[in-house]
Image (tube, grey):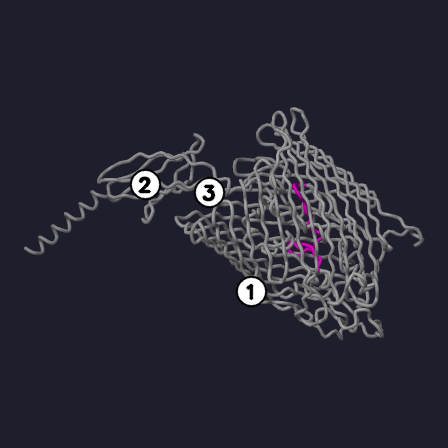
Amino acid sequence: MKLKKIILSILILSSSIIFSQNSSIAGSISSDSEALPYVNIYIKKTKIGVTSDENGFYELKNIPKGNYILVISSIGYQTKSVEIAIGNNQKLTRNFSLSEDNSLDEIVISGTLRPVSKTASPVPVEVYSQTFFKKNPTPSIFESLQNVNGVRPQLNCNVCNTGDIHINGLEGPYTFVLIDGMPIVSGLSTVYGLTGIPQALIERVEVVKGPASTLYGSEAVGGIINIITKKPSNSPKLTTDAFASSWGETNTDIGLRYNLSEKTQGLLGVNYFNFQNRIDNNNDNFTDLTLQNRISFFNKVNFERESNKIFTIAARYVYEDRWGGEVDWDKEFRGSDQIYGESIYTNRWETFGTYQLPTSENINFQFSANGHYQDSFYGTDAYTAEQLIGFGQFVYNKQIKENHDLLVGLAYRYTFYDDNTFATIDENGVVNQPSVTHLPGIFLQDEISLSKQNKLLLGTRWDYNSAHGSIISPRINYKWNSKDNADIFRASVGNGFRVANIFTEDHAALTGAREVEFKGELKPETSWNANLNYIKKINTENAFITLDASTFYTYFNNRILPDYETDPNKIIYANLNGFSISKGISLNTDILFTNGLTVNAGATFMEVSVTENSIKTRQLLTESFSGVWSISYKFNSSFSFDYTGNVYGPMRLPLLGKNDKRAAYSPWYSIQNIQIIKKFSNSWEIYGGVKNLLNFTPAANSINGANNPFDAGVDTQQNPELAFDPSYVYASNQGIRAFAGLRYIIF
């Protein structure tokens, strides 16, 4: 009898459960009145969830009675959470409309020269916002890029601390730096142009890895870095950001929005950086960090026109006085052989802008001009140089039918360069002969929509270099995406070219420690690149995850590399009698947790080799592995924490012959930083932390012959290992330090 009662009770309970779970929620998901397929709909803290079908319809079944939170999410759209109450055997109908989330799919311009969503772009573009750079405050964009995967700021001189930007193992001259899409930082400014940009005015930085010569011409071989400044209309009235470090560095950024008239708005920015502390912690009698005094002014004006036609113009001026050398050096010793110092005065001006023609067609005229003047001494060796660059291009964009987006460009670039080296001496070696280069070009690009999920980008460019003749640069890009954009695949093949000017690009050639030698006339470098990119987006209840994987392969002909090893007393430049290959894999992940935790991490594995006379060697100053990370957590609306860092594998270093006692390879090393931000209101906040937590610095003997910088009494031909040499450099000598700063904003 008892057994029958138990069985009966189980049956009643089971039927009750089944009955109570016979409830459901159904409906449709849309966006802008159009059905939205493949949307995730789930009940929080349960295992109940579905995905909407191709028509945007969904149905959740077998829901127990209770109160729940229904979550509707899709990649590229703002997630919606709705409270629901459901009873027994109840069938609810709920329709939802989602809004696009522009924060997850930024508008980019660098890949195709036209505004397009990051997801829709056939060219992979990485975007780094001002928020990213605030996680590790630095006095210049050059230093800020140290936490971008596959990008490494490389110091080229242990004394003057100038450097350039490496992308996927390729040196700075292969990286094309733009400001608002204009070629501003190039040639002589390669090692100086990324300093003095007021970071208060930077909206974002776009990075394209791989050749972009089809759109941008020479120098865009390794990739491009496009610094996008804020629009005056979207900027706060006043932005102030100032910080100082325990080493004695001070940096101030100020941004001010103003109105010239009802339809004319301006944005003024000022950056001032000062460091005058003679620190020598490694006891080699040389400054560990170059002393600097730099000021920069930036002004951008936007004119409102009929039909929303674009007209914007900007200008920047930079003055910098920097020196490094023996700690007791002073300006009275500039150019003398008493005390060694490297003193560099830089004056630089820039102007650039965009004017959209008042026509029914979409035609933009883009222009830029800049002048760079350098007055410097490297010990007793003087280097004075002047560079003027003028650039202009017309860009015509036309949508043809529904599946062709045509872009046609006509460009011209003028370069004037003069210095006091033999680079600008006539054939007889007597008369000064400045270099003048004319570079007209035309490019064509067609973005073809094969279907909603498939795009093909075809492009080609023809340039005529007045010194080297015609150069053609084609490219092809393909993009596929799943219907919900959760999976994106891109493939590309492209050609790049570069015309080199050694003295404007390689600061090691100016140090005076080695004689510079050219072998033959330097021909333009050419390269072919192939790139595969896959992106996976995952939206879960607790996190938004993006996985990004790329593989790259670049083959160079006529590559120009500095040869430090054939003769320890020389830097020899010549076109490579062979070939060079850069190949590797890059992995990135971004994870945004709903609890306030954000994780950005990346790693790059690469091999950059040089093959000459059938002998393969690893390229100097190139790591096989690099990793970066950024971990942030918001405790509440007031407090947040940032932990950033990077790690680099060993690099092959330039030695002064077989008797050089310095290590042939750099060690594994990591630069790590922490920061705490206290926000008091929407207007102001304070921040502080520690940089270089592990206090890593290179070996004390990095500067060879530091005790005899003028090689007095040394036969460097017989004993090259005794020569003074500051080119053995892979990381900064700046050790651990605290910093603190203040940000104040008036909206």
- Vertical placement of residue 407 versus 46, above or below: above
In front: label 1 or label 3: 1
Residue range highlighted in magenta: 161-181
Disc 1 to disc 3, C-alpha distance: 37 Å
* Amino acid type, callout 2: Glu
Graded by Cα atoms within 10 Å as few (under 14), some (14 to 19) or many (20 or more), the crowding at tag 1 reads some
Q: Position of residue 401 (x, y in %)?
A: 59, 27
Q: Is residue 168 magenta?
A: yes
Is the residue under label 2 in contact with that under label 1 (CB below 8 Å)?
Answer: no
Q: Secondary structure at mark 2?
A: strand
In front: label 2 or label 3: 2
So how many labels did they put on this image? 3
Identify which residue, 538 or 591, lies in the foreground. Answer: 591
Looking at the image, is mark 2 or mark 3 earlier in the sequence? 3
* Amino acid type, callout 1: Leu
- Residue denoted by label 1: 693
Q: Secondary structure at mark 1?
A: loop
Disc 1 to disc 2, C-alpha distance: 46 Å
> Which label sits on residue 83?
2
Graded by Cα atoms within 10 Å as few (under 14), some (14 to 19) or many (20 or more), the crowding at tag 2 reads few
